[in-house]
Image (spheres, helix red, strand yellow):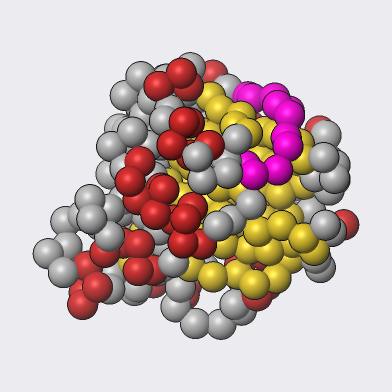
Amino acid sequence: MSFTLATWNINSVRLREPIVCKLLAEEGPDVLCLQECKSPVDKIPLEQFAALGYTHMVAEGQKGYNGVAILSKLPLEAAGAHDFAQLGHARHVAAKLSNGVTIHNFYVPAGGDVADRTVNEKFGQKMDYLAQMRDFFHADAPQKSILVGDLNIAPRTDDVWDHKKMLKVVSHTPVEVEALSQTQDAGKWVDITRQDIPDGLLYSWWSYRAKDWDLADKGRRLDHIWATPDISNAGHGSRVIRAARGWEKPSDHVPVFATFDL
C-alpha cells in the first residue's frame, strides 16, 4: 500500500476552505493533516472535502483557536487525542489507517515573542508541551507511526533564513531546538523531509508581515513529517508546495508532502 500524506497549518479551515479544496483537487494527497483549524469539529466544511473524495475525518476542534484535523480518502479510525501540558487546547489528534499505521497530528504552541518563561507564560507552555510529548513517547515507544504537524520550531541552521540572527528568536532558540531534539529522540523519530532533502535552505512558513514574502524569503521550516524507524525507509518523495504561500487569501504556512510505500 502506497499513500501520500501532507501536513498544513491552514490558519482557519473555514476561511480557507477554497484553497484546501484547491490543494486536494490539484495534488490529491491520500491524507491531509491540518492544524490551526480554528473551528468546532461540526463546523469543518466536510461536505466540500467529501465531494473531492475525502470522506473520512478524525478531528479535535474548538471555536476560534487551535484545532487539528486529519482528512482522508482512506478509511481510518480515531486513535486518541492528548491535552499535553493540560492547556485545554485542541492541539493533538491521532488516527490509525487500515494498514496499521498510526498518524499523530500536532500543533505545538508558538511560544510568544520572548524566550523566557519567567516573563512569558506562553513560552513556558511551549516548553512544558514539548516535555510532555517527550515523556509520552518515551513511556510508550511508538511503532509503525508517522508524526506530522506545525511543531513551531525550525531546528537546523538551514531551516531558517539566517541562523545567527534567529538564535534569540522564538522558534529557533537553542533551548527550543534541544527540547525538540529530546522529543524526537524519545520516539526515535526520523525526519523524513530531511532524509529526502538533506541539504540546503528549506522553509514552510513566511511571515504575513513581509510585504513581499517571496522576494524577502525570510522563511522558517516549522512544519514537519517524522516516522518511526520501522517505516522510515518507506518514506520518500518529500516536497514543499511553496507556491501555496501566494494563493488567494493564503495561510502563512504551506503544505509539506511525503509518500510512504507500505
Query: Any magenta on residue 77?
Result: yes
Compared to residue 113, the image places residue 83 above or below, namely above
- Which of the two residues, 33 or 120, is positioned nearer the viewer here? 33
Compared to residue 13, the image places residue 169 above or below, namely below
- Which of the two residues, 248 or 146, is positioned nearer the viewer here? 248
Q: Residue at 53% of width from left, 24% of height from top?
A: 60
The image quadrant of residue 22 is bottom left
User: Which quarter of the figure is the N terminus placed in?
Assistant: bottom right
Compared to residue 8, the image places residue 194 above or below, namely below
Q: Residue at 81% of width from left, 68% of height from top?
A: 233
Q: Residue most toward the left?
A: 211
At which x and y percent is residue 79?
73, 28
Query: Any magenta on residue 4?
Result: no
User: Which quarter of the figure is the C terminus placed in?
Assistant: bottom right
At which x and y percent is residue 126?
47, 36
Question: In screen coordinates, is 140 left or right of 173?
Answer: right
The residue range painted magenta reads: 70-82
- Which of the two residues, 27 or 60, is positioned nearer the viewer here? 27
Q: Residue at 42% of width from left, 62% of height from top?
A: 204
At which x and y percent is residue 6?
56, 54
Specify whether residue 71 is in view.
no
Q: Residue at 47% of width from left, 55% of height from top?
A: 25
- Which of the two residues, 65 or 118, is positioned nearer the viewer here? 65
Q: Residue most toward the front?
A: 51
The image quadrant of residue 231 is bottom right
At which x and y percent is residue 235?
74, 65
